[in-house]
């Protein structure tokens, strides 16, 4: 997961526009490194950017119903916060809160993030093109752990939009994997 504080008027992405190469990498691979690097170099726009450690081990993934805490500095001219991470198992889905206002008081603010489709890969829902560990649908004699692949599916829509969910078109089971928005609850609380 990637979290950044930044100025008002800056957006990491916009609906209906193509995903940046950094967002594409985050949405397709779960790799926050390129986005972290790009945002860290924008000192006029971005106050601080942090990323949670990537797996392995698998306990670094945040499963449904679980939570994770991140501390970040903000305030002053860096009055906005953005949060994003890949949704696994998907081809190119991510959840995000983009440019939400930081709380001005000690009262916590709770926001609900939808799932977005980065539009960079077709949603083939195949084990071979979805990275990640231990999917029941991907278990075979040659892949007993059920690990996903990561092959580039390509042929996406070309623009960021709300994700339509898992439909069972490939290997992924809609009954087991589908969702309805929102997909993440984010609580922002001042600590000092």
Image (cartoon, rainbow, N blue to C red):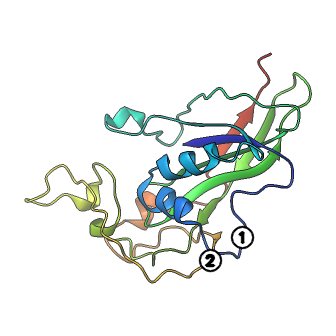
On screen, residue 135 versus residue 79, left or right, reads left
Residue 175 point in image, percent of width and height:
43, 63
Of the pair 106 and 34, the residue shown nearer to us: 34
Q: Residue at x 86, y 33 (%)?
A: 103
**Quadrant where the C terminus is found in the figure:** top right
Q: Secondary structure at mark 1?
A: loop
Q: Is residue 132 above or below residue 185?
A: below
Position of 68 with respect to 55 (left or right) is right
Residue 80: horizontal and vertical position, in percent? Answer: 81, 43
Q: Residue at x 30, y 49 (%)?
A: 133
Instruction: Give 124 or 33, whichever is nearer the viewer.
Output: 33
Question: What is the x, y in percent for residue 157?
Answer: 55, 82
State yes or no: discs 1 and 2 in contact (Cβ < 8 Å): yes
Q: Residue at x 59, y 51 (%)?
A: 38
Q: Which residue: 56% across, 32% down? A: 67
For mark 2, what is the residue?
A: 159
Q: Disc 1 designates what residue? A: 15
27 shown above or below 36:
below
The residue closer to the viewer here, 77 or 62, is 77
Q: Secondary structure at mark 2?
A: loop
| Residue 47 falls left or right of residue 63 | right
Label 1 vs 2, first from the N-terminus: 1
* Above or below, comparing residue 185 to residue 108 in the picture: below
Q: Residue furthest top?
A: 192
**159 is higher (above) or lower (below) than 56:** below
Local packing at callout 2 (Cα closer than 10 Å; few below 14, some 14-19, many 20+) is: some
Residue, far right: 105
Q: Specify few, some or many for label 1: CA neighbours under 10 Å numbering under 14, 14-19, or 20 or more.
A: few
Where, quadrant-wise, is the N terminus in this rendering?
A: top right
Residue 25 in percent (x, y) is at 47, 60
């Amino acid at each position: 997961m990637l979290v950044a504080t930044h100025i008002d008027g800056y957006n990491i992405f916009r609906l209906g526009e193509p995903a940046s190469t950094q967002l594409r990498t985050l949405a397709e691979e779960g790799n926050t490194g390129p986005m972290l690097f790009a945002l860290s170099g924008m000192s006029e726009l971005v106050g601080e950017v942090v990323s949670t450690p990537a797996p392995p081990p698998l306990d670094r993934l945040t499963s449904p119903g679980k939570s994770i805490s991140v501390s970040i500095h903000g305030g002053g001219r860096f009055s906005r916060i953005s949060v994003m991470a890949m949704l696994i198992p998907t081809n190119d889905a991510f959840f995000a809160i983009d440019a939400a206002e930081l709380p001005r008081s000690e009262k916590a603010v709770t926001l609900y993030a939808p799932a977005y489709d980065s539009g960079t890969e077709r949603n083939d829902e195949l084990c071979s093109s979805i990275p990640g560990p231990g999917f029941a649908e991907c278990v075979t004699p040659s892949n007993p752990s059920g690990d996903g692949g990561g092959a580039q599916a390509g042929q996406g829509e070309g623009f960021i939009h709300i994700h339509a969910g898992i439909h069972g078109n490939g290997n992924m089971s809609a009954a087991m994997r589908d969702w309805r928005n929102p997909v993440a609850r984010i609580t922002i609380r001042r600590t000092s």
